[in-house]
Amino acid sequence: MRLGVIGLGEVAQVVHLPLLAGLPELFEVRSACDLSPRLLQTVGDRFGIPNRYATSAELIEAGDIDAVLVLSSDEYHAEAVVDAARHGLHVLVEKPMCLSPREAEEIINARDQSGVTVMVGYMRRFAPAFLEAKELLPGLGRVNFARVHDVIGRNQLIIDQTSSVVRPGDLPQSAMQDRSARARALVTDAIGDVPSAVANAYRLLCGLGSHDLSAMRELLGPARGVHAARQWRDGGYITALLDYDDFVVAYETGVDEQLRFDAHLEVFTDTTSFRVQYDTPYVRHLATTLEIEQTSGDAITRTVRRPHLKDPYTYEWEYFHHCVVAGEQPKTSPEDFVSDLRLFAELVRHLDK
């Protein structure tokens, strides 16, 4: 499958391009684009990408590809996805797929009209430990409580210790201004004219939070609603209580300056609890584990399962290839992402009270 990569920033350099180079039987990166001439030359040379363009529109129009990977800034995801779909190209787009329901509708319409595959990059939902937890849960009895936790240090703290990343310093001021203006317009389109702290919280939900809440939905089903929510530190931290009829999920997220990554889903039943523990995706092959505590009679058993060391991103790419070839709808579809947008909007309504 011939690929075009849209955006050559951190996640392209650290994760996707090295991974794709290791899957030559499935993918060939034929083209790339970035607004930064420095990134385009340096990263293009590093990974031997033959065709290079300044914009996604130029890359898509040039052809010679079957699919695109959208890694650009969030504000431009929808534009690239819609354009690619209208040109008959399959799409894997990093989360968030978009920032507003209007954009999501445009993506779904473009996909339906062209018949291509559009998949959202929720790699945590492909981790073997997560899938094993999903299989385990129905046999554990009623759920009494669950916890979704994602409090991490800034990604750059980890990346700077473990990877050589080229960062752009040559973007025109007009491009930065356009990005900021577009972000404000899209957030307003999605949730209305809200205080800046609430808008920041919405962006945090669309970014980091989308991983957590998407995985929560697959594991436990959709939340019925939001009991309460609060943000602080100018939208940099969020906590919420999510309604699941006969139990509650506690959600908590934020980003700090500690050099660590703590993201997990934890579920409690009458005699068993388990935790799916994630580590940073910016150091490949760090294991996602399934930690289980189970009481039987007077004894408690604690086990840690590490089903596989294969990178969840690799599973995600293999799954994308399968969906395209087989013509199957991916589980992380645009409609699936719309469910997250609805929950983000409901959370924001509670934050804005």
Image (cartoon, helix red, strand yellow):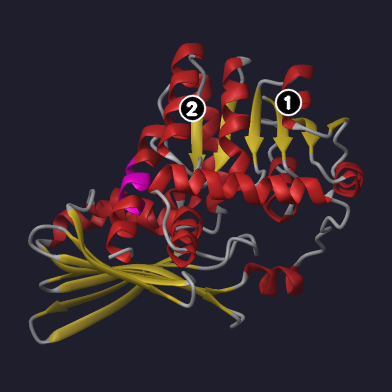
Badge 1 element? helix
Q: Is residue 287 above or below residue 271?
A: above
Q: Name the residue at 19% across, 83% down.
A: 300
Which quadrant would the C terminus be assigned to in this image? bottom left
Q: Kindly report the distance in space between the C-alpha atoms of the residues bearing marks 1 and 2.
A: 16 Å
* Image quadrant occupied by the N terminus: top right
The disc placed on residue 57 is 1
Q: Is residue 27 above or below residue 115?
A: below
Residue drawn at x 33%, y 75% as measured from the top left: 303
Left or right placement of residue 212 versus residue 60 in this view: left
**Local crowd at mark 2 within 10 Å, few (<14), some, or many (≥20)?**
many
Q: Nearer the viewer, residue 134 or 58?
A: 58
Label 2, secondary structure: give it: helix
Vertical comparison of 86 with 177: above or below: above
On the question of residue 16 being in view, the answer is no
The reply to whether residue 4 is in sight is: yes
Q: Amino acid at mark 1?
A: Ala
Residue 258, by quadrant, is bottom right
First in sequence, mark 1 or 2: give its number.
1
Disc 2 marks a residue whose amino acid type is Ile
Left or right: 262 as drawn, with respect to 273: right
Which numbered dot is residue 280? none
Assess whether residue 259 is covered by the magenta stretch: no
- Other-residue count near label 1 (Cα within 10 Å), few / some / many at <14 / 14–19 / ≥20: some
Image x and y of residue 122, in percent: 48, 47
Q: Which mark is residue 107?
A: 2
Asked whether 128 or 110 is in front, the reply is 110
Our reading of the magenta stretch's main secondary structure is helix
Q: Residue at x 88, y 53 (%)?
A: 170
> Measuring 15% from the left and 62% from the top, which residue is drawn there?
140
- Please state if 87 lies on the left or on the right of 41 as rendered: left
Highlighted range, magenta:
339-344
